[in-house]
Amino acid sequence: MRYTEVPSSPFIVALKKRRIKLGKIAVVPGTFDPITNGHLDIINRGASIFSEVFVVVLNNSSKSPLFSVEERMQLIIDATSHLPNVKVQTFSGLLIDYAESVNASAIIRGLRAVSDFEYEMQITSMNRVLNDKIETFFIMTKNQYSFLSSSIVKEVAKYGGKIDELVPSHVEKALKEKFNTY
Ligand code: ADP
């Protein structure tokens, strides 16, 4: 049996258009204090969909982070060096202003559990009010990272617990140095 090319249906045309749209710039914002394997999973998957991904360390004064902005950025740079389309930056202010400044068409957030949902919905709705052209995409975490957060990692690291499966090795080293738990 010979296969002939099916003429493009409106559906296929729409899909193709969407692909072209997806091939744009996305922003992955966060505190990243420090970057974990959960964050990295979201960044990796984002980078396989969008042509450019800007990971932005938000300098949010309401949190008192363990690592400085520069340290957090360096840990992300080292963790993403295998991804040529990922850039790491920092920003103080509204995420949507940053996203506009780099011409992003999308914001990527990770979702772990239902508990993330309400907060994310508020932020997404607010961002849509501020700029409805920038779409927020959610990437569901992998099961093994669903409990993982920077806070939990810090808590475990502080008391010398095992974190080698939760963060890249250079992050583990940086945490041990901070907490003097070598
Ligand atoms: P924020 O202060 O913006 O929540 P975080 O550094 O805690 O900053 O998280 C940045 C992003 O990474 C958020 O979208 C968050 O939901 C996501 N994220 C954090 N931990 C994980 C994980 N284990 N799996 C998937 N996504 C995660």
Image (cartoon, rainbow, N blue to C red):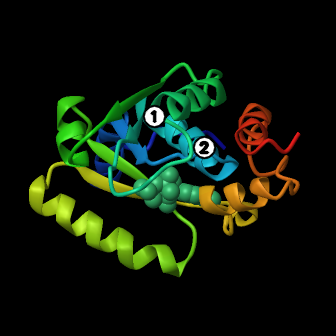
The amino acid at mark 1 is Val
The image's mark for residue 122 is none
Q: Which image quarter: residue 162?
A: bottom right
Q: Secondary structure at mark 2?
A: loop
Identify the residue at image location x=26%, y=53%: 135
- Residue wearing tag 1: 69
> Mark 1 Cα within 10 Å, few/some/many (few <14, many 20+)?
many
Q: Tell me where residue 182 sits by quadrant.
A: top right
Camera-nearest label, 1 or 2: 1
Q: Secondary structure at mark 1?
A: helix
Q: Residue 36: x, y in percent? A: 65, 47
Contact, mark 1 vs mark 2 (Cβ under 8 Å): no
Left or right of 182 on screen, residue 158: left
x and y percentages locating residue 88 in the rendered image? 45, 27
Kindly tell me whether residue 92 is visible in this rendering.
yes
Q: Position of residue 58 (x, y in %)?
A: 36, 43
Disc 2 marks which amino acid? Ile
Residue drawn at the location 21% of the way across and 48% of the way down: 94
Q: Is residue 51 visible?
A: no
* Residue 56 placement, left or right of 140: left
Residue at 22 percent of width and 44 percent of height: 93
Residue at 38% of width from left, 79% of height from top? 118
Position above or below: 72 against 112 = above
Badge 2: how crowded within 10 Å, few (<14), some, or many (20+)?
many
Residue nearest the viewer, comparing 123 with 70: 70
Report, in whole angstroms, how far the alpha carbon at label 1 lies from the one at label 2: 12 Å
Q: Is mark 2 within 8 Å of ligand 1?
A: yes
Between residue 76 and residue 68, name the one nearer to us: 68
Q: Earlier in the sequence, mark 1 or mark 2?
A: 2
- Above or below — where is 77 with respect to 122? above
- Residue indicated by mark 2: 35
18 and 89: which is toward the camera: 89
